[in-house]
Image (tube, rainbow, N blue to C red):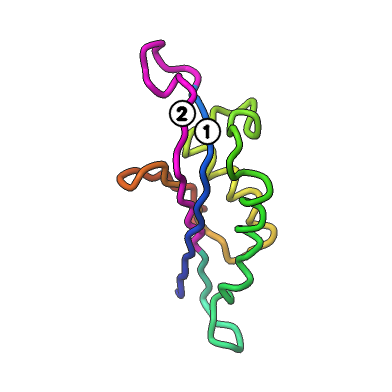
Amino acid sequence: MYKISKQFAFSAAHSLDGLPGDHPCTRLHGHNYVVTVHLRSKELNDTGFVKDYNELKVVKQYIDEHIDHRNLNDIMYPLNSSAENLARLFFDIFKPMLPELYAVEVSETPKTSAIYELDN
């Protein structure tokens, strides 16, 4: 199995529901997010790629046009804007465009990340 990944960055604000009132994440705050798309294939294409990295510009374009410098609560409602839900949202958006996609990782900080991936 061949695997590749590429990272994309954006900044956005959010607040989380369902936490104790004194939890800092209930207040509106922002992150410099890093999204990593993970692709895999049993075979390489004629060029020797899983996918040409240039073809992943659809991810950057979507993030730049719809996510960057926005309030994620507005975009994701009624879902809570957790990193886990954001990873699933991105997976569902990009999978039809990138059939080799098997996982999306979202990092809110350099030390934390959430991953949504296919079971198989």
Q: Position of residue 85 (x, y in %)?
A: 53, 37
Left or right of 1, for residue 69: right
Residue at x 61%, y 37% (from the top left corner)? 70
Q: Which residue is mark 2?
A: 29
SS for dot 1: strand
Q: Is residue 108 above or below residue 78?
A: below
Find out whether the residues at labels 2 and 1 contact each other: C-beta distance under 8 Å.
Answer: yes
SS for dot 2: strand
Residue 48 lies in magenta, yes or no?
no
Query: From which residue to which does the magenta span run?
Result: 17-38
Mark toward the start of the polypeptide (2 vs 1): 1
- Kind of residue at disc 1: Ala
Q: Position of residue 41 (x, y in %)?
A: 53, 73
Q: Position of residue 89 (x, y in %)?
A: 60, 43
Which residue occupies the extreme left position in the image?
Answer: 111
Residue at x 65%, y 29% (from the top left corner)? 74
Tag 2: Cα neighbours inside 10 Å, few (<14), some, or many (≥20)? few
Q: Is residue 63 above or below residue 47?
A: above
> What label does residue 13 carry, if any?
1
For the image, the number of numbered tags is 2
Left or right of 67, for residue 25: left
- Kind of residue at disc 2: His
> What label does residue 53 carry, if any?
none
Q: CA distance from mark 2 to mark 1?
A: 5 Å
Tag 1: Cα neighbours inside 10 Å, few (<14), some, or many (≥20)? some
